[in-house]
Image: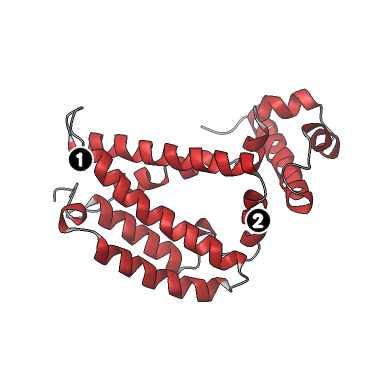
Amino acid sequence: MAEGLRERKKRQTRQYISDVATGLFLERGFDAVTIAEIAEAADVSVNTVYNYFPAKEDLFFDRSKGVVDRLSRFVRARRAGESAALAVLRELREEVESVSPKVGLIDGYERFMKVVHGSPSLQARLWYMQREQYEDLEATLREETGAADGDPMPALMAGQINWVHQTLMTTIAQEMIAGRKPAVVSREALVLLDEMEELLSERVLNYGVRAAG
C-alpha cells in the first residue's frame, strides 16, 4: 500500500528529529543534551519530540527494533539443511566480509560507541536491548523447533548464539574505538568468527536444522 502524505510527513519529521538529536549527542555527549535543546534545534515543541520518542534513549537507539529481532530474522531465513547457529554464522560472515555498517564496520562508528560508553543510561539501554534480543531469539527457536514450554533447550541455544553475536559486536566496537580501519577489523573479525564456531559443540551447530523440501 502506498504511503499517504500524512504518514510520509510524520516519518520525515521523526527522522529529522532523530538526526538533529544524534548530531547533538555526538558533539556534546548524551547526558549533556536536554530534550528542550533538541526540540529547539529541530524547531519543534518538546511535546512533539516526546510524541515520537517517549524516552530520551529512544532518540539515540532509534532503530532498536531492527536490532532486537535481528538474530531471529537470520534463523527464520535459514536454508534447507541449515541449522539455526550456522545460519547466524553465515549471515554474520557475509556482513563482516562486505565491511557492512550493520556490524559497525564504518568510519565514524567509534564516535557512536564513545557516546554510549560515556553514558550510564545508554549502557543500561544497550544491555536491555541485548536482553530483548536474547529473549526474542529464544521465542523464535521455540517456535521454529516446536519445543514444549518447559523445554530448556531453546533458551540454552539462544544463549550460545547470542554469545557469538555479542562477542563479535563488542570486539568490533573495541577495535573501531581504538582507531583501527574497518577493512582491517573485518579481516580479524572473520578469524574471530571461525574461532567461535570451533568452540560451539556439535549439538549447538546441529540444532534447529530446517528440513529439505
Res 213 seen here: no
Say whether residue 109 is left or right of residue 48: left
Mark 1 vs 2: CB contact within 8 A: no
Say whether residue 187 is left or right of residue 27: left
Q: Position of residue 139 (x, y in %)?
A: 30, 34
Q: Quadrant of residue 91?
A: bottom left
| Mark 1 secondary-structure assignment | helix
- Pick whichever, 187 or 175, lies toward us: 175
The circle on residue 114 is 2
Q: Residue at x 43, y 60 (%)?
A: 168
Q: Is residue 121 above or below residue 75?
A: above
Q: Looking at numbered disc 2 in the image, what kind of residue is underneath it?
A: Lys
Res 4 seen here: yes
Q: Quadrant of residue 92?
A: bottom left
The circle on residue 153 is 1
Q: Looking at numbered disc 1 in the image, what kind of residue is underneath it?
A: Met
Q: Is residue 212 above or below residue 155?
A: below
Q: Position of residue 72 (x, y in %)?
A: 35, 43
Q: Earlier in the sequence, mark 1 or mark 2?
A: 2
- Pick whichever, 171 or 67, lies toward us: 171
Q: Position of residue 7 (x, y in %)?
A: 64, 29
